[in-house]
Every structure is written in structure tokens, then in C-alpha cells.
Image (spheres, rainbow, N blue to C red):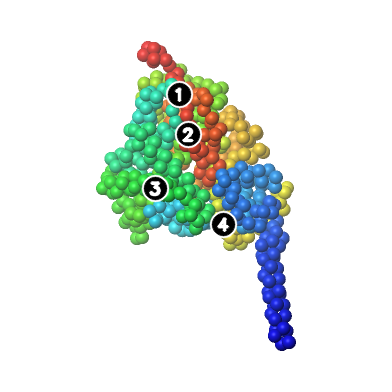
């Protein structure tokens, strides 16, 4: 009898225990996130409030940017996209999130090279400020526009024009060629003219090989940044092999450039490891961090510039009326004439950088095809962040520790600022309305904003504008017949975007025929 009573008591305890565990689970995983969490005031799908894995799935399946943008259309300028994450599509909050410099989230800490952090992957403000202080002047517009830098950029453009003259009228994978061009620019910037390895010397041989190794290496971006604990299980060995080739290629140039420390040519290596940088009481950069810095700048710098240029020409080819306006502006700039394809003399940046229609084409491409269109996560500070209220969401506090993202993809598609926002239309920037232009530029953040904005902005804009002005003074661009651009060249939905399959075949036809060019 006693044993039966004890067994019943034990069964009751187990039952209550199980009931308690189930109740706690229901409270923790269902009731609290949906009804008691401070973020429950922020609208969004219930599945996002319940689990972080839904938005992770959208990122993995390359749907996140579009998905979050659709959520904003349904729920308003702030949406809850995870149990502890919100996304904001209102440029009025750029000041709180970026300009006031909220802490970066752990998302960025995974951008480590050679087992060493760099400026981009440094999360804490003090460390980032110290690191960036060393390189800010080097990437300033003043330095980019020096005779030394401009001479080698013009040299790259002249080399590019010679290549184009060889391939004119034939389909050419422009994404590879622009990647080669940008790779030469950023490697010279990093290592110097004596120590870099030119890929433009063999653009579709070694150049293509190097570019595609970087393309493959970056394909693990989701596992690297979102679920690094599962990376070894999820990422094919071929990606790591490609990554190692990229590391080796940059390390070889970096090691050679160490012999140039103290040379008169100012390079990234000289800037971070030179006597001036090392003479401070506590130098920020050692060789490992300097090498990681070079890898970060080269990997990001060539990719984003090439992507932007690829979609500039893709869009021009699809919009011949826009292309005609741009060609006409450059014709007038060149004294009322087209330039010959075999004229390899590059234009001067200071003379073309403010051409109105050229800038309109660049701004519109940066808006629609921002090379980094995805989330830029920050963390709400102590005391949280005040949501000042909107039609859909009343005023509330976004509690400290909440991940706050603002994706350029959505900011650039604010229909209250940009009419027909998905339509590529440079003419929208050619208006005589200063207030409207001010608002549009406020909502244009392809390089992010604040202290952590893209440090390479000035170099990138120089390359992009120099490329377009030189090319469109000599060529018209066309799409290749019978190529499926929607399938092989669509704008990938990722944190950093590219033509999805690394392809952008285009045809460049000289504006002057050979007889005219000789006259």
C-alpha cells in the first residue's frame, strides 16, 4: 500500500513538473514575446516576434531586403523582424542610429581576416575611433585628388580604354572588367605602384581568376555573419579553398610592400605602419591588423565599385534615351565631339566630377542598385531609443540591447520621396527644386552615414565617374541578344550585392567609326 501511495505521489510530482515546464515554455516562447515584451508595441508578423530564425531564413534564401521592404509597406516605418530586432525605414532616424554612432552589433565582428580584426569589424566605439583616425586622411577627398593618386587612376583608365579598344563590338563580361579595374585601383592604393599585382594586365585570364575567387569566397557571407557556429557544417570546402587563394594573393603583395615603408609614395601600408603611425605611445596597427585592414578594403572596394558600374551600363543599355542624354553632355564637355576608341588619354577627374547628368546617372544607380543594400545593424544604447511615433506605431521606447537595422534598400524606395521608386530614372535628379533635392539626398545612403560610413567613398566615386565619363565619351552600350539577364545578372538580394552569377555581358560600340576617328 505504501509503495502504491509513493508511486502515485511520484506520478503527481512528475505531472506537475511537466505541467510547470510546459507552462514556462508557453510563457517564455509564446506569451512573453507576443504580449509582454516591450517590443510587442512594434508591429510585424507574429512569426518574427516568436523566433529569430524566420528572418535568418529570409537572409539565407536571399529574400531579406525585399521581404523587409514589403513589411514596411504593410506595417509602416518601423517593423519588428525578430524577438529582439526592429527595422526602420524613416530617414529621420539616421541621426539617432548612425550619426550619434550607436554601437555596432556582433554581426560585424565576424569580418576578421588572418585571425585579426580591422576597422570595419571593430565593434567598440573607442577602438573604432582610434583605428579610423589613422586612415581617415588617407581616404579623404583631398588625398584622392592629389596629383599622385590621380596620375595612377588616370593610368588605370588609359589601360582600360586600350583593353576596350581590343574588345569593341564584342560581348564582354563587364562585371569582370570593372572588378579588374577597381582591383588595380585599390591594390595600388594599398601597396603602391611598385608592389601591387595588376590584374588589368590580363583581365580575362589571371584577372578573372582572382575576381572569381573573391566572388566564391564571399558566397559564405550568411554563415560567416549570421550563424558562424554552423559554418563548418554548411560551407563547402571549395569556398575555403577560394578564400585561401585570396588571402595568399593579398598577403604576397602585402609582404612585398613592407619593403616600401618609408618610401615617398603614400599607401595604406605606409599610413598604418609608417614611422608616424608607429611613433604614437600605443600604435593601433601591428602587421597582422594592417594586413587584415588591406584585405577588408580590397575585398569590399573592388566588389562594390564593379557592381555599381555593372548596373550603370545595364541601365543605360535598357534606357537608350537616358544614354543619349549622357553621351550628349559628355560630347559638349569634350568640345562638341566624340572621342575615338583608340584615344587612350584619360580625362581629368576635377573637370568631370560635377557634370550634372553624369551625377544624376550615378546617384540614381546608387539609389536603385546600392551595392550594400542590406541591414546595417546597431544596438540600442543604455536607456533605449525613443520611437517618436507614426500613423501605424505610437510613441514608445525601443529598449536598450535591441538590434536596430536600417537597410538602404528601403530608405531608397520611400515612395513619399521618390516617385515610382523602383524605376531607374536619372531625370528625377535634374529638377530645379532645392528643397526636394535636399530631401532626396537625405534619403540616399549607399555609403551609410556617420562615423562608420564607408571610408572608401571618395575613391569609389572617383573611379565610377572617371570610368563612365571616359567610356561614354567613346562608346554606346547595348545588351547582348539572347542572354537571360533576369536569370544570370539579376541584382542579388544580399547584405552586399552583386550580379547574381557574376555575369554582366554587354556590347560597347564606338561612337566614331574608324574612318571618322582618323579624320
Whole-number angstrom distance, CA of label 4 to CA of label 3: 34 Å
Whole-number angstrom distance, CA of label 4 to CA of label 1: 46 Å
Residue 404 horizontal side relative to residue 257, left or right: right
Say which label, 4 or 1, has the lower sequence index.
4
Any mark on residue 325, and which? none
Residue 136 horizontal side relative to residue 419, left or right: left
Q: Quadrant of the N terminus?
A: bottom right
Marks 2/3 in contact by CB < 8 Å: the verdict is no
Whole-percent x and y of residue 157?
38, 30
Whole-number angstrom distance, CA of label 1 to CA of label 2: 16 Å
Q: Nearer the viewer, residue 509 or 240?
A: 240
Residue 71 horizontal side relative to residue 291, left or right: right
Q: Nearer the viewer, mark 1 or mark 2?
A: 2
Count neighbours of disc 2 (C-alpha within 10 A) and say few if under 14, some if 14 to 19, many if 20 or more: some
Q: Nearer the viewer, mark 1 or mark 3?
A: 3
Any mark on residue 241, and which? 3
Q: Nearer the viewer, mark 4 or mark 1?
A: 1
Indicate the secondary structure of the residue bearing disc 3.
helix
Q: Nearer the viewer, residue 4 or 304?
A: 4
Tag 2 residue: 503
Residue 400, above or below 183: below
Amino acid at each position: 500500500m505504501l509503495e502504491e501511495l509513493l508511486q502515485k505521489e511520484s506520478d503527481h510530482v512528475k505531472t506537475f513538473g511537466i505541467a510547470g515546464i510546459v507552462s514556462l515554455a508557453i510563457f517564455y516562447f509564446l506569451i512573453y514575446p507576443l504580449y509582454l515584451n516591450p517590443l510587442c508595441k512594434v508591429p510585424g508578423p507574429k512569426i518574427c516576434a516568436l523566433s529569430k530564425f524566420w528572418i535568418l531564413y529570409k537572409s539565407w534564401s536571399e529574400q531579406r531586403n525585399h521581404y523587409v521592404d514589403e513589411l514596411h509597406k504593410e506595417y509602416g516605418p518601423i517593423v519588428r523582424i525578430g524577438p529582439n530586432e526592429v527595422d526602420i525605414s524613416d530617414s529621420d532616424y539616421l541621426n539617432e542610429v548612425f550619426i550619434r554612432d550607436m554601437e555596432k552589433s556582433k554581426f560585424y565582428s565576424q569580418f576578421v581576416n588572418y585571425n585579426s580584426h580591422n576597422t570595419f569589424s571593430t565593434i567598440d566605439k573607442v577602438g573604432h575611433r582610434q583605428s579610423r583616425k589613422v586612415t581617415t586622411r588617407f581616404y579623404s577627398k583631398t588625398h584622392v585628388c592629389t596629383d599622385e593618386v590621380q596620375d595612377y587612376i588616370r593610368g588605370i583608365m588609359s589601360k582600360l580604354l586600350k583593353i576596350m579598344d581590343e574588345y569593341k563590338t564584342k560581348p564582354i563580361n563587364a562585371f569582370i572588367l570593372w572588378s579588374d579595374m577597381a582591383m588595380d585601383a585599390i591594390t595600388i592604393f594599398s601597396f603602391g605602384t611598385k608592389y601591387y599585382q595588376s590584374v588589368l594586365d590580363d583581365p580575362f585570364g589571371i584577372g578573372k581568376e582572382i575576381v572569381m575567387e573573391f566572388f566564391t569566397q564571399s558566397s559564405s557571407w550568411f554563415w560567416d555573419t549570421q550563424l558562424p557556429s554552423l559554418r563548418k557544417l554548411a560551407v563547402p570546402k571549395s569556398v575555403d579553398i577560394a578564400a585561401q587563394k585570396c588571402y595568399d594573393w593579398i598577403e604576397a603583395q602585402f609582404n612585398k610592400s613592407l619593403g616600401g615603408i618609408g618610401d615617398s609614395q603614400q599607401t595604406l601600408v605606409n599610413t598604418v605602419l609608417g614611422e608616424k603611425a608607429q611613433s604614437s605611445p600605443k600604435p593601433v596597427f601591428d602587421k597582422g591588423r594592417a594586413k587584415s585592414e588591406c584585405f577588408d578594403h580590397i575585398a569590399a572596394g573592388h566588389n562594390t565599385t564593379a557592381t555599381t558600374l555593372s548596373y550603370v551600363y545595364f541601365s543605360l543599355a535598357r534606357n537608350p534615351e537616358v544614354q543619349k542624354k549622357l553621351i550628349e553632355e559628355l560630347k559638349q564637355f569634350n568640345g562638341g565631339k566624340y572621342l575615338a576608341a583608340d584615344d587612350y588619354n584619360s580625362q581629368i577627374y576635377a573637370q568631370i566630377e560635377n557634370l550634372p547628368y553624369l551625377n544624376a546617372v550615378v546617384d540614381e544607380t546608387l539609389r536603385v542598385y546600392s551595392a550594400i543594400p542590406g541591414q546595417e545593424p546597431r544596438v540600442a544604447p543604455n536607456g533605449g531609443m525613443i520611437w517618436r511615433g507614426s500613423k501605424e506605431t505610437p510613441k514608445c521606447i525601443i529598449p536598450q540591447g535591441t538590434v536596430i537595422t536600417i537597410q538602404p534598400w528601403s530608405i531608397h524606395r520611400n515612395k513619399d520621396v521618390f516617385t515610382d521608386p523602383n524605376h531607374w530614372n536619372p531625370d528625377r535628379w535634374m529638377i530645379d527644386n532645392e528643397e526636394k533635392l535636399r530631401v532626396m539626398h537625405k534619403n540616399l545612403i549607399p555609403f551609410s552615414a556617420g562615423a562608420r560610413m564607408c571610408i572608401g567613398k571618395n575613391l569609389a566615386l572617383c573611379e565610377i565617374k572617371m570610368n563612365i565619363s571616359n567610356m561614354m565619351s567613346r562608346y554606346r552600350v547595348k545588351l547582348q541578344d539572347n542572354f537571360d539577364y533576369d536569370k544570370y545578372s539579376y541584382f542579388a538580394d544580399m547584405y552586399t550585392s552583386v550580379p547574381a552569377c557574376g555575369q554582366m555581358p554587354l556590347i560597347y560600340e564606338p561612337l566614331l567609326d574608324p574612318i571618322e576617328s582618323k579624320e
